[in-house]
Amino acid sequence: MGITSLYYFCLLAVGISIYYIIPKKCRWVWILVLSVGYFLTTGSALLLLFPVLQTGAAYLSGIGMDKAGDGEEAQNSKKGWMLTGVTGNLICLVICKYLNFGLYTYNGFIDLFNIDAQPLDIIRIAVPIGMSFYTLSLIGYVLDIYYGGIEAERDPLRLLTYSMYFPAIVSGPILRYGDIGKSLFEGHSYDHKQITFGLQRIFWGCFKVLVISSRLNGITAPVFGNSGEYSSLTLMLAALAFVMELYTNFSGSIDIIMGASECLGIKLPENFNSPFLSKSVQEFWRRWHITLGDWVKVFIFYPLLRTEYFRELPARLKKGLSDKLPGRLSTGFSKKTAKTVTTFTAMFILWLSVGLWHGGSWKYLVGSGILHWFYILLEETGEPLWSKLRAPFKGRVGAFVLRVWQSVRTYLLISIAFVFFNSGSLRAGFSMLADMIANGSEGMNASALIAGKDAVILIFSLLILSAVDLAHTLTDVREWIAARPLPVRWIIYYALIFMVILLGNYGPGYDAAEFIYRGF
Amino acid sequence: MNRRTFLRSVVFLSILALLLTMVSYIVRTNGSVKNRFAGFYAEPKDSIQVMFFGSSCVSRSIAPGYIWGEYGIKSYALSSNSQRTMAIKPLIEEALKYQSPEVLVIDTRVFLYDDAPLLEDEAHMREVTDNMVYSVNRIKAINRLTEGTDIDKPAMYMDIIKYHSNIGMLFEASELKKAFYRSKDPEKGFEPEDDYFHNNAYDQWGKVNTIPINPRQEEILRELIAFVKSMDIDTVFLTSVTLPEEEFEGKAAYIGDIVQKEGLGYVNLNEHYEEMEFDCMTDVSDGVHCNTFGAYKCSDYLTRYLIDNYDLKKETEDSEDWDEAYELFMKHMKDSEDNLEVFCKERDS
Amino acid sequence: MTKEELYERLNEVFRDVFDDEDIVVTATTTSDDIEDWDSLEHINLVNAVEKEFGVKFTMAQVTGMKDVGEMVDIILATKNQ
């Protein structure tokens, strides 16, 4: 059941209404019921085994760690339990999502080098909804207990409510048990402001997905499959449009999810924070898919840097690793360089993970992973050069121009990376980028892709989106609207509702608004 | 939630429902059927004396403007293209909510065909349901028409799902007037056809042996007959001007038999070409529909039949827009006469 | 060890990690106050503090500490055990 479908809204209406009618103590149980029910509408009932078993593994792991107690000996036992919980979950994830990675690589290899061998058949496995998201939420739960941040949950059904929580299971945000646990199980009282704010956020999300994202898809979908047929300018336009399409699609879904959760009184962590104001790629990943960035930072990056190997690496690099290696690797780096090399080695593993999380194929590994590592590496190591280039931009105008340039540059770098994300394969991505340079003015152009009326609506909606996102950096937009006189705010609410109804791409004749992140 | 917020929410949602209804009505696809139905709802209560039902033949061959101008009788058709026989009963029920006609005239053309091929024809079903105002009767009509099909019901109930992209309508004055689906149709539902030569003249139908119609259609016919008898309104079943293809003569006779056995009126215009001075070469537009000349002749014959057999009185009130409809019709006649001359000259040269 | 001594040694660590001789930290200093103190440098800082004071932070403490004051409290608590 797609989250912009009529059925989903009916589910929300009924689900939320009943939540506030039943006694407070039972309310979290009702959330579990809704979550399991929603899950069952998304695929075969057998798939339910996955979240149940994974939650079971995490649950036992947590109880095991708690029972192990404190002290030196307990530490080994704790580690064992932790590894059980983490590996149990990872195995399920690997089975569902990464079995084909080796096959893709093999097939890509023989194709690239024209080797005369039979490509292997891809294994088709049904994936439970939200697996990439809830698995991380569960692994995070296990590790949070291991690291001493939280205590194990005693009630397995409560843990299941956490992992299967129906708004978040669709496309995140990735949850931390310590942050959400209490709120999830408290029976919340009816709060009219919360419900209306939640509904407003849901409609805003629908606006982003149905009005903007689906229209942009009309431009990107034909082009990305077929880059040879379009002019360079059109290819570039499609790449730029895709970033906005992904943003509106993903953040719009998140808005619907957050709004639905807010209607239940449960506040989820934000996943987006005006990402296009970022001055650098590094900053971008602090504003885009925030919960993923936080998760990999806390559960991969930091633990990695705290291992023996990485603690000692700077010192070893200063001394030189081995006489047999070339250049500085034998004579030793400066202290600063040693630190940088260490950090970026760990970061490489981090970005490898991020890429892999997006999917078990090379295009994700590069487009959502390694390429970003490379950008950040350039940003950090090239800092002396960048400072020199920034120097002339002084004063208010200069600073403003610089600011705009930095945002534009970030957007361009991200577009290049996302070309891989949206292409069929790594090769297709390279192909498209090559075509951007080579095609010139040969080939179809953008006017073939979008009708005049739609282009006008698109521009109009993007302006509204920009205005609201910018306004958000200054104030809470919903609060601001709520403070206006009644006729004014009602007109704004009606305008939002009717923009979605009249300008949205839905209903017969349109493809069901596809959630790009739903298959994750 | 305290009383004030509750009331505010109710008001907010009520206004929303109203706006949604108005917008839905406006963005429904425009055209002659929309004009006809919206025109029907705009007629003053209990002012229509004769109601017509059926498919596109009705709107082409019945000219309410002429019937008013010549005979002082107010009539209206709730017809739509390829209208399924299943739609007639709910449309009669709809009409009776707003009008108290003295006679119902039901065109039997579609009874001559099988209903099954029209089952998945969502477009023509919507021509009926998406031209009705929101009501329980509309919901019933949708349920009735979509029975046995795979058509997605929610999109039928809430037609804005289908038409929401017609935002151009929000800028058309003629459509904005239909915000409450009450907007008088100057033609009173009549659809003049301009084309008017059919190459095959066909003869007046004679007496033939009856041929049974499709059993499902017969079921629907009998249900309809039982229904109008229970409402105790005079009803005439009509077979409009039709090419005599596919055993239609026998099937029409079959229908006529059933109807008359039940004590209801039956007129087959195809048996009265001589009386009507009907000429298939000049009075039919495409072999299926009448043109303006044909409409004049059919309307005239039928109205005299109704006046003779049912006690219809002349109406005199609220006549301004009806007078206009008559003038419009006479103008169509004049245009057709001019074009006829031109065509004959070309043909004979 | 007194608090003053602790802060003195802490200043040294900060100056070393961030390569800036002018840094002086107080209880309310956060990552917003020092330009290079981002998530990349945070671990380097934590590792260096651990080495200097011979303490070990848990992962939860590493990610949880909001300002230098919290860091100091943890050091003192561990040292006084």
Image (tube, grey):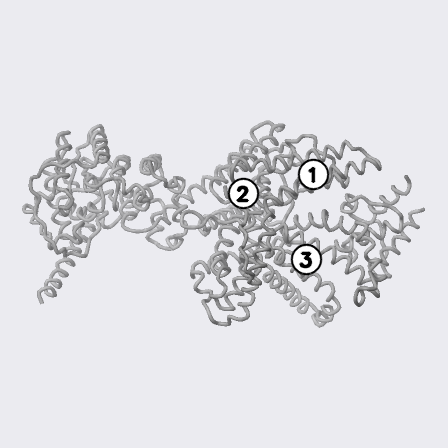
- For label 2, the residue is A126
Lower sequence index among marks 3 and 2:
2
Q: Secondary structure at mark 1?
A: helix
Residue extending farthest to the right is C1
In-front residue for pair A242/A180: A242
Expressed as whole percent of the image width and height from the top left, the position of residue B109 reads 19, 42
Lower sequence index among marks 3 and 1:
1
Cα separation, mark 3 vs mark 2, equals 35 Å
Tags 2 and 1 on a common chain: yes
Camera-nearest label, 3 or 1 = 1
- For label 3, the residue is A283
- For label 1, the residue is A85
Instruction: Evaluate whether residue B224 shows in this view.
Output: yes
Residue at the image position 31 percent from the left and 38 percent from the top: B145
A199 in relation to B334, above or below:
above
Q: Residues within 10 Å of mark 2 (few under 14, many from 20)?
A: few
Lower sequence index among marks 2 and 1:
1
Residue at the image position 37 percent from the left and 48 percent from the top: B26
In-front residue for pair B164/A92: A92
Q: Secondary structure at mark 3?
A: helix
Residue extending farthest to the front is A116
Q: Chain of mark 2?
A: A
Q: Secondary structure at mark 2?
A: loop
Q: What kind of residue is marked 1?
A: Gly
